[in-house]
Amino acid sequence: MNNPSDLVCDFVNTYDVESGSDTIPSPAALAAWLGRHDLIGPGDTADDDHLALAVNLREALRVALRHNHDHGPRLSHPFTGLPLRVTLTADGPVLEPVSAGVPGGLARIAAAVMNVQADGMWPRLKVCTESTCQWAFIDSSKNRSRSWCSMRVCGNRTKTRAYRARRQTETASRHL
């Protein structure tokens, strides 16, 4: 399985906001994705309810990662409907799936979120601030200030739009 931070980003990135493409548009695609990430067994199948649960979890995580730019409100309850329990260990509480199959696989993603938090990496997981992108990434900058998934693409788009808006305002001011 991926490390927890990569797993969370990979899951959020199953929907590409810019292109509108979804890697998990059907129950079968969801089961295949979970299987490729070793979160379910080879014979496990998904249904429409599982797909709805996965989409709700994914989009709740996207919202939570968006808030990591401004240290805003945290994830409140996207784990509703997932078979999870909290086990108290000598190292602290651990969130664990309590069933197998697709619900258990989705619960493992939720547990990965808790592992990311426990490792201190949660504030580094973000989504691109470019509104047309929203791609999840790990902010590896020293001061945790990275805003875009790619400075070359999304950062450039944002800065170009801001520049053009300033120029348009300056031009309009000169004609008054």
Image: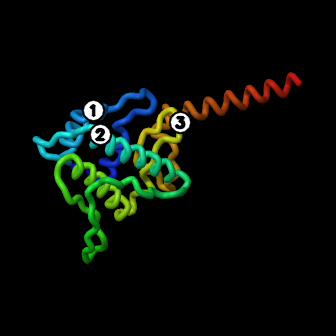
Task: Name the image quarter holding residue 93.
Answer: bottom left
Amino acid at dot 1: Ser
Residue 12 on image: x %, y %: 37, 43
Q: Which residue is mark 1?
A: 26
Q: CA distance from mark 2 to mark 3?
A: 25 Å
Q: Which residue was labeled with disc 2?
A: 51
Label 2 residue SS: helix
- Indicate how the structure is coloured in the image: rainbow
Locate the C terminus and report the quarter of the image it occupies: top right
x and y, in percent, of residue 72 in the image: 54, 56
* Whole-percent x, y for residue 92 in the image: 30, 73
**Circles 2 and 1 in contact, beta carbons < 8 Å:** yes
Q: Determine the residue located farthest toward the bottom in the rendered image.
A: 90
Question: Where on the picture, by quarter, is residue 31?
Answer: top left
Q: Which secondary structure lies at badge 3?
A: loop
Residue at 52% from the left image edge and 44% from the top image edge = 147
Q: Residue at x 41, y 49 (%)?
A: 61
Distance between mark 2 and mark 1 Cα atoms: 7 Å
Q: CA distance from mark 1 to mark 3?
A: 25 Å
Task: Count every numbered label the image shows and give the total.
Answer: 3
Q: Residues within 10 Å of mark 3 (few under 14, many from 20)?
A: few
